[in-house]
Image (cartoon, rainbow, N blue to C red):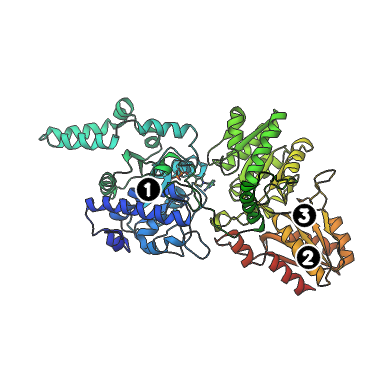
Amino acid sequence: MYKYLDNIDSPKDLKKLNIDELEILCDEIRDFLIKTLSKTGGHLASNLGVVELTVALHYVYDSPVDKMIWDVGHQSYIHKILTGRKNLIKTIRQTDGLSGFIKRSESPHDIFEAGHSSTSISAALGIARARDLAEEDYVVTAIIGDGALTGGMALEALNDGGKRKTNITVILNENEMSISENVGAISSYLNKLRTTKSYYKFKEGLESLLSKIPIIGKKLIRLIRKIKEGLKTTILNGGMFFEELGYRYIGPVDGHNVKSIVNVLEKIKKSEAPILLHICTTKGKGYKLAEENPDIYHGVGIFDIKNGKKIIKGKKTFSSVFGDKLVEIAKENNKIVALTAAMKDGTGLKRFSSVFGDKLVEIAKENNKIVALTAAMKDGTGLKRFSEEFPERFFDVGIAEQHGVTLAAGMASNGLIPVFAVYSTFLQRGYDQVIHDVAMQNLHVILCLDRAGIVGKDGETHQGVFDTSFLTNIPNMSVFTPGNFEELEVIMEYAVDKMNSPVVIRYPRGGINNIFNIKTQDFNPFENQVLKKGKDLTILTQGRLSQDALNAANKLQEEGVSCELLYMRCINPIDYDSIINSANKTKGILIIDESLEDTSIKNRIISNIHEKSKNIRIDYLTLPNKFIEHGTVEDILERYNLSEEGIYKKIKEII
Ligand SMILES: Cc1ncc(C[n+]2csc(CCOP(=O)(O)OP(=O)(O)O)c2C)c(N)n1
């Protein structure tokens, strides 16, 4: 039971409180967030950092008339709480629950959707220019973190907005962190500003002091305003970068002092000029473990509030039950030893990201041409170890995927072998660079695409379901889709040692339990592998769905249906010969692909096969042609029949 929070169902209720009560409300919100997110998981640290800011914004401004645009949107939970969704926060990121990001369909207070970073200033400018053309009057505010400010788009927008003097407020939430520590020269500059005295306070204080001096005081203020530029340069120097770009710089303001923020927002509310308000916050504020480890608590699963320990929930697998039981037995019996044949991680404890990271360290030890790149995703992509072992060969470019790709191209053109680990969805940002800077020059850049396919709780903005279409149409580009950890390792070796052209290696979030026998010795990675022979239907699979397909085929075998399973490890170029050979025998193909119907490789296969043979029936099982919603990976795959059961049913339907 919360004294104030319980009574807040909309920003109107918030406005009934006085400023002292706001402070108590902030404490209540923190408590509510920690307790709720410990049971659901989510972006805890980022949200704890913006409690006071969000409360102040909704206290001073009149949402949704005044518009707030949240960059990335991962820090919008308090905004959701204050705009009528408090009781649904417990469903956040769950299947059929609230989105973890801004969603226009959820509330009129959600103005502009995101998930990828650095878009808020451009969107705010667009909204403000539409307002101005319609001669309307309301406040437009972009709220952007110092991490997101490293993205090129944010700087493009600042550049545009400052010149045209579009009336928006940019609130820069500086906490010195992206997901891991923030990088780059602007970050160092902000850091310096953080330690300077508040320019805003000083200037306001000075002006109010002078205004008290009769007659001469006003003249002095005018004079001071006139020599403002010089004064700033010589004495204050605060925010000059932003002032030069055309913004009135205000700050730094303590982002955990709700009174100060309310005070500043009240003052700038009526401003006609573009403003950059710099607030300083602590990521994870109010939960000691998150303050100490903001990177770990950036996005968390379910955890124990007392000690921060992860609580792993989910379906039990035979493997995990076996593993737990074996430990229990071994404690009692010291004769027990455990053996495995390269399948230590079938239990899902290991992830593709960590296998990738460890393998890259191993390869880099032997080959000093290897360099690793990330766009602010060192931890997520598994590059932490590499960054520690080879700091001089590791490059975090900030949230700047475009720059990352071209930087890699430059490195490759001068003899290095760059490996850029990037999430499938974020590489969408670097598409032109992949074509124009990497592929066209046929450079040996290795793009390791993590989170390919369905990613789960992050939903629409993060699903890795487009790269299969946008990367497999590029000349010179080879695209591999390893189906288990061991195959990832051998493909990485192959890409480094045997190739001298652009390579993509795409793999899903987490781990998989593919137990089928993928050839990893004396193999040609461009050829499909026959996993099971059959005569009734050819099934084409790749990546993580292959095991489900094999299980379904085996089950059908018992019912007298014999499927031939072709495992594709490379989806560009496609090994059409093996497909046509098999299909000439079975007269039917089922293509299974975890991409959208229209982005799937099925389209290329269908047109190629139909050119060669008209009497082969082709069916497919893909995701539907829409932006795929959030939910657990299992729920989403099951929902769209990309599961053992779904594949089984589809084959039966065809046969
Ligand atoms: C284009 C893009 N690349 C990477 C990410 C992954 N990502 C999500 S939040 C984040 C850090 C953002 O830092 P900041 O803007 O400072 O916000 P904070 O969480 O620190 O408040 C990153 C890198 C993303 N959302 N978009």
Q: To which quarter of the image does residue 613 belong?
A: bottom right
Provide the residue designation for mark 3. 516
**In the depicted structure, whether residue 43 falls above or below residue 360:** below
Is residue 13 found left or right of 581 in the rendered image?
A: left
Q: Are marks 2 and 1 in contact (CB under 8 Å)?
A: no
Is residue 526 found left or right of 232 in the rendered image?
A: right
Q: Is the residue indicated by label 3 positioned so its CB lies within 8 Å of ligand 1?
A: no
Residue 438 seen in the figure: yes
The numbered mark, 2 or 1, whose residue comes first in the sequence reads 1
Is residue 481 found left or right of 348 in the rendered image?
A: right
Q: Residue at x 73, y 66 (%)?
A: 620
Provide the residue designation for mark 1. 50
- What SS does tag 1 mark? loop
In this rendered view, identify the residue nearer to me: 301 or 331: 331
Residue 552 x/y as whole percent: 75, 65
Q: Amino acid at mark 2?
A: Ala
**How many C-alpha atoms fall within 10 Å of the one at disc 3: few (<14), some, or many (≥20)?**
few
In this rendered view, identify the residue nearer to me: 639 or 65: 639
Q: Amino acid at mark 1?
A: Val
Residue 464 x/y as whole percent: 62, 54
**Residue at the left extreme, as displayed:** 214
Q: Nearer the viewer, mark 2 or mark 1?
A: 2
Residue 419 x/y as whole percent: 66, 38
**How many C-alpha atoms fall within 10 Å of the one at disc 2: few (<14), some, or many (≥20)?**
many
Q: Are marks 3 and 2 in contact (CB under 8 Å)?
A: no
Is residue 481 found left or right of 320 in the rendered image?
A: right
Quadrant where the N terminus sits is bottom left
The numbered mark, 3 or 2, whose residue comes first in the sequence reads 3
Provide the residue designation for mark 2. 553
Q: Residue at x 28, y 37 (%)?
A: 200
Please tell me the numbered disc located at residue 541. none
